[in-house]
Amino acid sequence: MTGQTLIQKILAQAAGKEEGVTENEIVFVSPHMILSHDNSAAISKTFYEITGPNGKVWDPNKIFIDLDHAVPPPDYKKAENHKIIREFVKKQGIKYFYDCGTGICHQVLPEEGLVPPNVVILGSDSHTTTHGAFGAAGIPIGRTETASVWAIGQTWLKVPETLKITFDNFLPKDVYAKDVILDVIGRISADGATYKSIEFYGKTIDKMSISDRMTISNMSAEAGAKAGIFPVDNVTDTWNKQFNFQYEKLEADEDADYEQELSFDLTNLTPRVAQPHKVDNVVPVEDLPRTKVDVALLGTCTNGRIEDLRIASDILREKQINPDVRLLIYPASRSILHQAIKEGLLEILVEAGGQIGVPACGPCLGEYGGTLAPGEIAISTANRNFKGRMGTRDAEIYLANPAVVARSAIAGYITNEEG
């Protein structure tokens, strides 16, 4: 058997295959944790269809449910879904349940110390890839499959091929992890890593925080990836000290077989913007024509962390947003919100004209909390700019880093120039 990639080693451990696994092999794995959110109402219905009305989940200590998609619920139907989920949680004795306002599932799961390295995290959300930032295999699955895992504790996966991406040199000033992953997606396309795992290497990642890595792993899904993994290093170790995890540092073998190896020189990278209506429609911000902005969204599971709020606050300090712009701020979790309060960041953002939302997904879903009207344009730190993503197919969404969003809110048009 040839050398093993990181995803192969993690899946081999989860499947109990000491000899390793091969690309495209079908393996049965049991997850360390399986996450879901507001879609748990629909999943619970399928679960009872599988098990019968008195069915019991396989392990109530390995199921994580976080209400984050419609928080607070904007209508009675979504409130009823939340009620169904709460009743299911009580009936099943599920340990890790987080009610409205705790934060977005992909942020809360690692904050709660539930993502050690080398494990498989399954989730009924496409951005479960986020957990690759911690050296885990975060793998998205569907709702029906989630219900099945709740019932029997395992599922089958095809071992993906692996794409190795190396980042050379360090990031220039005013360039962030969001620009790095947008540049990657723009180059390899939105299906360039379909059903593949991506491994990230290079000098650059040594300087990347956990927050930076979460942004990149999160948006690996936008290239079609099944997982986006950073190898465990000193940055991961520092994060993990708070949880006293015990683990070995898995490394890909030197003779690991990669489907493709790509190298990105970041020396001259500038802030990137994804134009409507595809995440891979990426250009340097300086190449955009003057594009007015109606809504600026700062937050989501991609860029709603404390570092992102600090970046925006530094730019917005003693400034005012354009009177024609609505600046929406959605911290990724309650703990981040608390930290932002302690640091005085919220005062800065509110004084600049920003509106603070509950730690949740908010307008990223397009169902509540700042949806767009037809003809409006948003600049957003979120991960998707598809038609209809923020409430109407007749609006346009541009994706960018937190600094570009903040500066655009001041200027009234998309820019990275100081206001």
Image: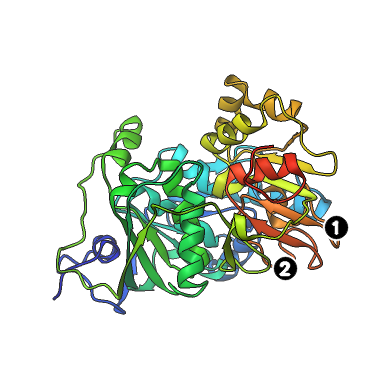
Q: Which kind of residue does numbered mark 1 sit on?
A: Ala
At horizontal 55% and vertical 43% (from top left) the residue drawn is 97
Above or below, comparing residue 417 to residue 336 in the picture: below
Whole-Å distance between the Cαs marked 1 and 2? 12 Å
Q: Position of residue 196 (x, y in %)?
A: 39, 71
Q: Which residue is mark 2?
A: 387
Q: Earlier in the sequence, mark 1 or mark 2?
A: 1
At horizontal 22% and vertical 72% (from top left) the residue drawn is 21
Q: Quadrant of the C terminus?
A: top right
Q: Which residue is mark 1?
A: 373
Above or below, comparing residue 337 to residue 382 in the picture: above
Q: Position of residue 373 (x, y in %)?
A: 85, 57
At horizontal 27% and vertical 47% (from top left) the residue drawn is 232
Q: As drawn, is 237 to the left or to the right of 393?
A: left
Residue 298 picture quarter:
top right
Q: Secondary structure at mark 1?
A: loop
Residue 240 picture quarter:
top left
Query: In the image shown, does 149 or 319 lie closer to the viewer?
Result: 319
Circle 2 crowding by C-alpha within 10 Å: few under 14, some 14–19, many from 20: some
Is there any visible trace of residue 229 in the rendered image?
Answer: yes
Q: As drawn, is 186 to the left or to the right of 361?
A: left
At horizontal 58% and vertical 20% (from top left) the residue drawn is 342
Q: As drawn, is 357 to the left or to the right of 170?
A: right
Assess whether mark 2 and mark 1 are in contact (beta carbons under 8 angstroms): no
Q: Position of residue 88 (x, y in %)?
A: 61, 51
Above or below, comparing residue 217 to residue 300 in the picture: below
Disc number placed over residue 386 in the picture, else none: none
